[in-house]
Structure formats: C-alpha cells, structure tokens
Image (cartoon, helix red, strand yellow):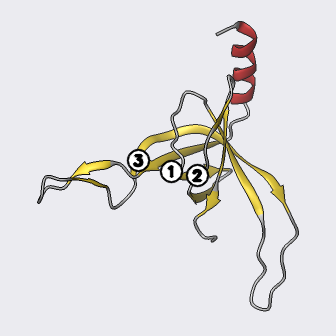
Amino acid sequence: MNTDILLARKAIESTYEGLCTIYEYIEVEDPDTGETIVSPEPVPVHENVPCKLSKKTISAADGGQIANTIKYEPVLFINPDIEIKAGSKIVITQHGVTREFKRSGEPFVYNTHQEIVLQRIDTT
C-alpha cells in the first residue's frame, strides 16, 4: 500500500472514538442431529474493534399522538481489513453510550476505511 494511503488511513483511524463488537449468525452443527444449521443466536466474530459511529442524515422529530420518532441514518466507519457481512448485528459504545444495531448494510470498502449503514434494534 502506498505511503499516501497509509497516512490517510492513519488520519481517519485517529478519529475513531468508539469500540464495536460484530455478531453474525454462523453455521453450526446441531449436536442432536449432526445437521448443519444456522446458529439461533448471533455469535461474536470481532470484539472491541475501534470505530466511529456517525449519522448520514437527520431530520426533525416526527410528532405523533403517542411519541416522537427521530429519523436518521447511522453509519459505521471502521478499518477496511475487518470483514463485516451484510445482516450482521453490531454493538457500538461511543462517548459512554452503547447502541445495538441490526441488519447492517453492505459495506462500502475504500483503501482507507469502510462505511456501513446501520439500523437500530429498537426501530422498525
């Protein structure tokens, strides 16, 4: 990798303010039948990985009769060497706040970082 890309990557990674754990549903052997099945619970595949959680868009609260809904598109910035499959569960702690995300989108991988659109677990 050329020096300019390494310097740019180092600069981007210096902005990472959080840590994340990435979970996947993996294939496991059913102990009773010996068949290969998908794990019923997500399994951690990467833990305590430096990252940055940001937002792509944000809008004003949507006032309803019961509660307001805040709409935004969270984006994860992370090292491009970490393999993150679409659909992974990702738990991120940043600035003392922990948030859980489901159905991660397809990663957009660049030489210096990758960006992944996320969906909060507590939203539909």
Q: Residue furthest top?
A: 3
Decide: marks 3, 1 in contact (CB < 8 A)? Answer: no
Residue depicted at x 49% and y 46%? 22
Label 2 secondary element: loop
Decide: marks 3, 2 in contact (CB < 8 A)? Answer: no
Return the x and y of residue 38 as percentages of the image width and height: 32, 55
Q: List the residue tagged with mark 1.
A: 88
- Camera-side mark, 3 or 1: 1
Residue depicted at x 12% and y 58%? 33
Return the x and y of residue 110 as percentages of the image width and height: 68, 27
Q: Earlier in the sequence, mark 3 or mark 1?
A: 3
Q: List the residue tagged with mark 3.
A: 44
State the separation of the CA atoms marked 3 and 2.
14 Å
Q: Where the N terminus falls, by quadrant?
A: top right
Q: Earlier in the sequence, mark 2 or mark 1?
A: 1
State the separation of the CA atoms marked 3 and 1.
10 Å
At label 3, which amino acid type do we have? Pro
Q: List the residue tagged with mark 2.
A: 104
State the separation of the CA atoms marked 2 and 1.
5 Å
Query: Above or below — where is 86 with respect to 63?
Result: above
Left or right relative to 23: residue 64: right
Crowd band around label 1 with a 10 angstrom C-alpha radius: few (<14), some (14–19), many (20+)? many
Residue depicted at x 54% and y 51%? 90
Return the x and y of residue 24 as percentages of the image width and height: 43, 49
- Camera-side mark, 3 or 2: 2
At label 2, which amino acid type do we have? Ser
